[in-house]
Image (cartoon, rainbow, N blue to C red):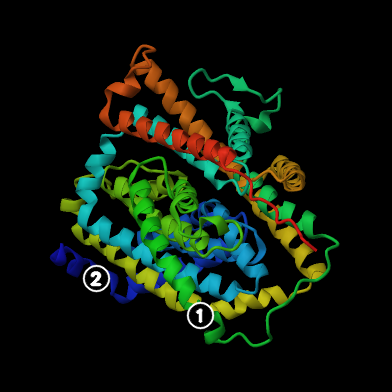
Amino acid sequence: MIDNLLLGFQVALSAETLLYCFIGVSIGMFIGVLPGVGPLAAISMLLPMTYYVSPTSALVMLAGIYYGAQYGGSVASILLRLPGTASSAVICLDGYEMTKKGRAGSALMLSALASFIGGSIGILLMAAFSPGLSELALKFGSQEYFMLMALGLVAASTLSEGSAIRGLAMVVVGVVLGLVGIDLTSGAMRFTYGNFELMDGVSLVASAMGLFGLAEILANIGQGERAVPSSKITLRSMMPTRTELRDSFPAIWRGSAIGSFFGALPGTGSTIASFFSYATENRISRNRDRMGQGAVEGVAGPEAANNSAAQTAFIPTLTLGVPGDAVMALLLGAMMVHGVTPGPQMLTESPDMFWGLVASFWLGNLILLVFNIPMIGLWVAMLRIPYRLLYPAIVVLIVIGTYSIRYSIFDVYQLLAFGVLGFLLRILRFPTAPLVLGLVLGPLMEENFRRSMMLSDGQFSTFLTRPISCGLLIIIVLILAAQAVLAFTARRRPAPEKEISTS
């Protein structure tokens, strides 16, 4: 592995490759900051430009846009409760609360550190275990994926800031919304009511922007100007406290492990990894009672997870030729355009390209860390912009970002509908994060369930006869049983007696 990495750094440190790595991560970070645009649109627009450069430089730049957007996506989530990317949506929950408490600089610094550590761990795992992790991913059939999605939906109930029942209710709403569109098995249109704009389903970008961004603006209209940070943002003021560092590092390690696992599985990716990381912290963190109220674990864990997943997502794409999401599919197409055939033979036929790409990931993450820290003061300075100027600009960016995905005015209507829905849910004290996760996992869960039923001739026992699937089912049952026991003991616990005054 050391020889391979030396070969990779020899390629990555060349002037041309290093230049395109810097260009890629810089574009990716700024694309991530802009809400709703995302790396997919940026890569699509820049793909024709790569035809005139070497295949290695082209892939290094496009990959830099992808994982650079993971860095930038958390900035708007933390400062404005606007997820720059879908994977950073869950960071809104605690990141924005830290901003309201005057800890925006610390939140952004922790986010940058978690991104770098999570990405570095993902790169090391990619370099060391690409063949082994690819073989593990091959063992995941439709039964395992269904149980994995079911585990995600059960864990999503822990995202609820209050009642777990309300969290599960929002998961169900998200799953139902995920059923809208064309049935992949029969080709029939479901729940579209004759509207062809819904053939591709409910827009994830419009839902996330509406539920988190537009709803936040509607909730804060008329609340007056918020307290702004000091005019001078120093490095010392941005440094997290010892307590914040102590609480965040265990979450970073856990998030990196979760993200590395999900990134290596085709079809999952950084969005699911970040939600799983948050659910894990909400269950086992020492400060789980403060989750959703500005806990550093709610920022550090998911941020490390989505960046490590962004790195290990290249494992199935490069070693198996199996893209995990739309961005990976686009990068796969870019490789084929340049005459590169991804798959097991890539390690032997094009080792300089493969290991050069791996080495460029670490260099890109280092550039992003160095580039991000001086920019934190600029990002925090955004909070000094008055609401009367900031809110119209945010609404314009949200609308443009939503419209630019499919150039559809109907997506803007979806944005408005989800904004009103998010505002009403806030009034009724229903959590919105489980709804987004249900919308993400619902279609994948249905697809893998139906495929499992077709392969087993309708036998439900297929989920029990496969070891990994059965193990995941046992975990789901244990989680549900634990929640039931906790709820029962909480009800049986006697209420504290009131003191009787003798005066």
The quarter of the image holding the N terminus is bottom left
Q: Nearer the viewer, residue 20 or 498?
A: 498
Q: What residue do we see at 68% from left, 74% from top? A: 382
Mark with earlier residue (1, 2)? 2
Q: Nearer the viewer, residue 340 or 94?
A: 94
Q: What residue do we see at 61% from left, 79% from top? A: 378
In the displayed structure, would residue 405 be above or below residue 410?
below
| Residue 134 place in picture, x, y as percent | 25, 44
| Helix, strand or loop for disc 2 | helix
Hey, what amino acid is under mark 1? Met
The quarter of the image holding the C terminus is bottom right
Q: Nearer the viewer, residue 98 or 323?
A: 98
| Foreground tag (1 vs 2) | 1
Query: Is residue 142 visible to us here?
Result: yes
| Residue 210 place in picture, x, y as percent | 69, 48
| Helix, strand or loop for disc 1 | loop
Measured in 3D between alpha carbons, the distance from the residue under mark 1 to the one under mark 2, in whole angstroms, is 31 Å
Q: What residue do we see at 44% from left, 52% from top? A: 284
| Residue 373 place in picture, x, y as percent | 49, 78
- According to the picture, the residue beneath numbered tag 2 turns out to be 9
Q: Is residue 179 left or right of residue 6?
A: right
